[in-house]
Image (cartoon, rainbow, N blue to C red):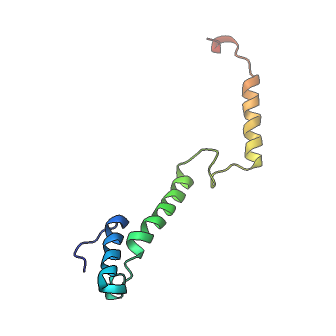
Amino acid sequence: MQTGYAINPARDLGPRLLTAMVGYGKDVFTFRNQYWLWCPVIGPIVGALVGTFLYDLFFFTGSESILNKPDANARARLERAMNQERQRSIVGADAV
């Protein structure tokens, strides 16, 4: 069987498919009662989804975020604050 472990699906799945076609059958995927499809194929997909969710939750601040989307009250409060800031006139020492 395999002597090294590859988490890269391209390095792991291709040789397993070829070995299964050559004549080893399903034993290639269930060697020692462990299903090797989980780690190299399903693992990176699940990891990417979890990583994307965590990035969107903690770091991303854009308006197209699914998790950090402001509700109607927050949008109205933000718009009022922006309108008040626009209406202020710069007078005195602040006028440069």
Q: Where is residue 80, by image quadrant?
A: top right
Residue drawn at the location 55% of the way across and 53% of the way down: 56
* Nearer to me, 30 or 46: 30
Instruction: For the C terminus, give its image quadrant.
Output: top right
Q: Is residue 10 left or right of residue 89?
A: left
Quarter holding the N terminus? bottom left
Q: Is residue 88 left or right of residue 43?
A: right
Q: Residue at x 30, y 68 (%)?
A: 6
- Residue 2 lies, with reference to residue 88, above or below; the image says below
Relative to 61, is 11 above or below?
Answer: below
Horizontally, residue 21 falls left or right of residue 58, namely left
Residue sitting nearer the eye, 78 or 40 = 40
Q: Position of residue 62 (x, y in %)?
A: 60, 44
Q: Quadrant of residue 92?
A: top right
Toward the front, the furthest residue is 22
Q: How many marks?
A: 0
